Amino acid sequence: MAGWTDHDLEAVGRLAEPMSYDPDTDHYVPISWDDAYAMVGQALRGLASPDEAAFYTSGRLSNEATFLYQLWVREFGTNNLPDCSNMCHEASGRALTAAIGSGKGTTDLEDWELADAIWLMGDNAATNAPRMLTWLAEADRRGAALVHINPLIEAASRRTIVPHEFADMATFRTTRTGTMNVQVRIGGDLALMRGVGKALLEAAETDPAALDREFIEQHTNGFDAYRAAVTATSWDDIVRGAGIAEADIRRLAGSYLRSQRLIIAWCLGLTQHEHGVDTVREIMNVLLLRGSIGREGAGPAPVRGHSNVQGNRTCGIDHRPTPAFLDRLAQVCGIDPPREHGLGTVAAIEAMQRRDVKVFVALGGNFALAAPDLPRTFEALRNCDLTVQVSTKLNRSHVVHGRRALILPCLGRSERDRQAGGEQGVTVEDSMAMVHISYGMKDPASPQLRSECAILGGLARATLPDSGTPWQAYVDDYDRIRDVMARVLDGFDDFNAKARRPHGFRLPQPARERVWLTPSGRAEFWAGPLPDDVDPGQGRLMLTTVRSHDQFNTTIYSNDDRYRGLTGLRTVIFMNAGDMRERGLSEFDLIDVTSFSRDGTRRTVYGYRAVAYDIPRGNAAGYMPELNVLCGLADVSSQSEQPVTKHLVVEVTPQPSGRS
C-alpha cells in the first residue's frame, strides 16, 4: 500500500471493518470494535501524562461528534486538540476576534444577494467553493462589481456555466463571474489593502462621503493611529509590496467608492502566510472606513470550504480554549477540564518527533499529507506508540503510522445512522454561521460501520471507565448531546427545536448587530507596518500552492485539471513565461525546485515540469499536497502558528541531463 499513489488509495473504495496493524506481518488485519476500543483505552491510561497524547480533528466531524470529542479529551485531561484550522483559517479567526470581537464573518446568503460589490481575495471559487459561482453569476446579472484579487488568473474569475440552469448547460452558454482581475503578487495583499485605504483617505479630503465618519466615531477605536500609519506609508512602498500600479489600486478603490454594499471574501491564499493575521486586519480596516460591517449586503466573509470547519471551532475544538468556555463546560458536564493551552498542529508534530507525544488520534482528514514538511511529519507519526485514524476511505495516513495502528471505519454523512433511540441526525455550521440538521438516506456500506458519535462513545468509555459522563446515553440519542450543548455553547439555546426548522437557524454574530466584544467595546483599527518579505531575492521565485479541479483538500479524484488545461499531470510548476525564458525553459521542460527554510535547511523536488501561466513575474504555483514537502516545520507564521505553504521562497533550475 505504501507504494500506491494517493489517487489509487482513494479509488479502492470504502473501508468496511476495523483494522489493526500487525507489525509481524506488516499487514492490517481485522479487529473487533471492543478490542479496538480496549487498545486505545489501555494506551491512553498507560501514559505518564494526558499531554502525551494529541487528538486531531478535520472539518468532517458533525457538531455533535465535535462536542463529544472535546469533552472526552478534556475529561481525559489535555487540551492537545490540533485541528485543520491550525493549517487553514487560524489567521482569519485571530484577526477577526481582534478587530470585531468574534472569529467569524458577518455576512449571510441574503447579504450576497444584496451586495453591489464582491471582492474575492486569495480564492479560486471553482475549487474552493464551487457553489459560490451561482451567487457570483446572479450578482453579475444585477450589475454588481465582481473583483478577483489573486496572483493567478483563474477560469472562474471570468465566466462559468451555472449547473442548475439546464438551458445554459445544454447550449454551453456561460455567465460572467468577474468584472475585474487584480493580479497581486504573492504576499502582496496587505500592501494592496493599505493602498485602497490610502486612496479612500485621500478621496475624503475633498469628498466627505468617501468615509462613514459617523460609523467611525460611534463604533471604532484607533482610527487616528491607522490614518497616521497610512499617511506614513508611501505609494512607492505600496506599489512595490503589492506588485500593482498605483493607478490600478486607485481604480480598485474607486469601485468601492461607487458601492454602498461591499463584501470582501477570502480563502487560504491570504492566510497561509507569515503576515496572514495582519492582512485580514487590513481588510477589516478597509471595511471599517466606510461602515461596511453590520450593514445589509456588506461585511467580511472568510471562505471556510470544508463541511464543518467553522462548527468544529464553535463546538469546542480549540487548543487555546477560553476560560469562559471551560468554566461552562465544567459547570454543565461536571468535569475538571485542564486550563493550560495545548498543542496546535505543528507543535504536535514536533512533540511527536521528540517522543513527547506517544499516542495520536485523528478524527477524519489525511494528516500525513495535509501537514507541512512531509518527511518530518512521516517520521513523527512513525515515532508514536499508537496512531488511530477514524476514516471512510484509505489515504496516506493509513500507511504512515505508529508502531501500532488502528483504522476505525465510520459512516458517511449520507448513510443512515441507526442508534437505540432511532435514526439520528447531525448538524453542521457553514461559513455563514447557519446550522442545519441532516439525516442519512442510504444504507451503510457495511454493517460494521459505526457513527462518529458511537466511535467516540466507545473510545471514551474504554479510556475513562470511572467517568460519570453518560456516554452510552449520548450515543443512543443525539438529542441528549444537543441538550447539553445548548447549556454550554453561546447561541445554541433550544438547539433541538431550532435545528429542526426547515432551513435551520443562524448563530448570533454580535458584530453583525454592531455589538463589539473587544476589550474597548468598539471595532478596532489596526495600524501596523507593511511587511518587507514579499521580494524573494535575486534569481528566486515566490511559490504558492493551489488545488486542481478534480481535488478536494488532499483528496485527489483524478490527475486532470481542466480549469488549467492539464491532463494526467500534477508534478508541474506554473510560471510566468518571462521567468521561464530567463531560465532557458520551454513548455513542459523538466525542472528541479528547491525551497529555503527559515532554519537554514533546503528541500528539493525533482523532475517537475515547467508550465507557462498567467501569473506575475517572480511568482510561481504548484499543487498541494505534493508541494507541502517544500514547507519546513520552521516555516510557520509567528502570528497564527500556520504553515506558510503559500509563501515559499524557491529556486527553479533546469534538471541536469541524464536524470529523470
Image (cartoon, rainbow, N blue to C red):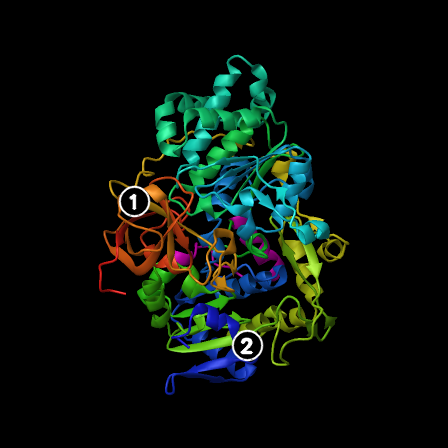
Answer with left or right where residue 355 lies relative to residue 431: left
Q: Is residue 475 above or below residue 62?
A: below
Is 71 magenta? The answer is no
The residue to which callout 1 is attached is 581
Image location of residue 617, percent across then percent down: 35, 40
Q: Secondary structure at mark 1?
A: helix
Bounds of the magenta segment: 323-346
Quadrant showing the C terminus:
bottom left
Identify which residue is drawn at 46% across, 21% down: 224
Q: Secondary structure at mark 2?
A: loop
Quadrant showing the N terminus:
bottom left
The amino acid type of the residue labelled 1 equals Arg
Image location of residue 459, percent across then percent down: 54, 73
The amino acid type of the residue labelled 2 equals Leu
Residue 572, quarter of the rendered image = bottom left
Is 345 magenta? The answer is yes
